[in-house]
Amino acid sequence: MLNNQGVEILCIGSELLLGNILNSNAKWLAEELAILGLPHYLQTVVGDNSNRLEKVLLDASKRSRVLITTGGLGPTPDDLTTETIASTFKTELIEDKSIIQDIKGKFHPKFKLPKNNIKQARLPKGAKSVPNTSGTAPGIIWTPIDSFTVISLPGVPSEMKLMWEQTIKSWLCKEFPFREIITSKTLKFTGISESALAEKIPEILTNKNPTVAPYASLGEVKLRITAQSKTTNEGNNLIKPMEDKLKEIFGLNFFSNDNQSLASIIIDLLRKRGETLSVAESCTGGSLAATITTVPGSSDVFLGGVVAYNNEIKQNILGVPLELIEKYGAVSGPVAKSMALGMRKTFRTDWSIAITGIAGPKGGNKTKPIGRVEFYIKGANSNESIQENFGSHRSRVDIQKLSVVRALDRLRLFLLK
């Protein structure tokens, strides 16, 4: 291990502090460090300011064995990382001719190399350059003081990831061979809240190795099982009994491990059954169909859908009787049922799903508040009417997303039966 000092991540860029872009680099690097079994305790974001950057660098040098930075290696004046690292540790910058040639080779022969790009070829004296095969900014690996190494990478995610795979990962493995391997697996659940899930497994959530931690997202709860071991196989052997136990406890609330989505589960189930699906949507505005079609190969089973936002479309395309809408309202169980029946008949599918509701922020009343959504699922020998109240406190987008999750989950349960 790294003498309990660990690895720090420092992401540089005012655009990160202002919220203009999402800091996906920190998330990705943290996951990679966990896979390598390297302890990682702190992440920092600093803007394009040399004084503040210098302070963060000095603080990190006192508590960490390795500091990985991203950003600030470009050719513009606000790209200050390399210069600030060198000045912080009182080291001069040396121009590397081979880097200049590499950068020149990445420009079209008709264009002259801009002077600004020359700064990217200047590295702290004694630093090792990290090749960048997809961009002009090389990275650096430099140990300015004993027991402290700085690894600087570009902020462009695609460049950073490629340099990590080509150079940084192997360097870390070589430098720190006596590390524990971190193995993890994520289980996904729906139809149960994070608090309700946690109440069922208090002893499991305090387990030491493997550890189990819950993570909630809209409409889903995830349990991440993480094991520390000498090898990946040992880690998997620790995880498997815990995985089996959690699946047994939560039954059909569990729907997948790792990267499978509800939509992909449904596509697989329908494909195995040789059955097809169509959808009729009102308040979700096509979100259900869009979610389904993100799955490669969904055209095998998904024939299409109708966004019947206007009542006339419900009548003319789906065949919903006007008197039904007038009697019960567009957001009602009978109208949802009629939409599903019309959809299934028009598209000649084995299954159809209809959704109609009040996503807000206006349109609700005492009897039908914002967040009320009606569903109807129709199969050859199965049907179900569902009413949900997702709450007027939720945003329009959240109500739409929850509606999609609920519809897919109910169809999943039908198909499993």
Image (tube, rainbow, N blue to C red):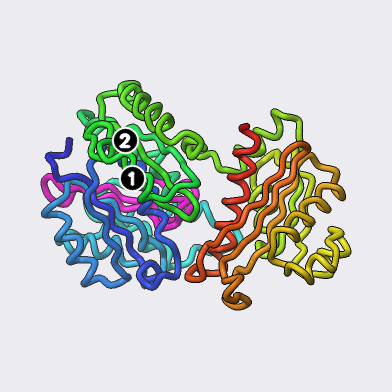
Front residue of 237/190: it is: 190
Which residue is label 2 attached to?
A: 226
Which residue is label 1 attached to?
A: 198
Tell me the amino acid under the disc marked 2. Answer: Thr
Q: Earlier in the sequence, mark 2 or mark 1?
A: 1
**Does 181 sit left or right of 365 as displayed?**
left
**Residue at horizontal 76 percent and vertical 34 percent from the top:** 275
**Does 194 sit left or right of 255 as displayed?**
left
Question: How many labels sit on residues?
Answer: 2
Horizontal and vertical percent for residue 243?
Answer: 39, 30
Whether the magenta-drawn stretch holds residue 150 is answered as yes
Q: Taking the image as drawn, is residue 300 in sight?
A: no
**Does 351 sit left or right of 342 as displayed?**
left
Quadrant in which the N terminus is drawn: top left
Horizontal and vertical percent for residue 256?
Answer: 50, 36
Label 2 to label 1: alpha-carbon separation: 17 Å
Q: Quick check: marks 2 and 1 in contact, CB under 8 Å?
A: no
Front residue of 289/379: it is: 379
**Residue at horizontal 41 percent and vertical 65 percent from the top:** 75
Give SS at disc 1.
Answer: helix
Reply above or below: 279 against 331.
above
User: Which residues fall within the magenta stretch?
Assistant: 131-159
Horizontal and vertical percent for residue 133?
Answer: 47, 46
Reply above or below: 92 against 240.
below
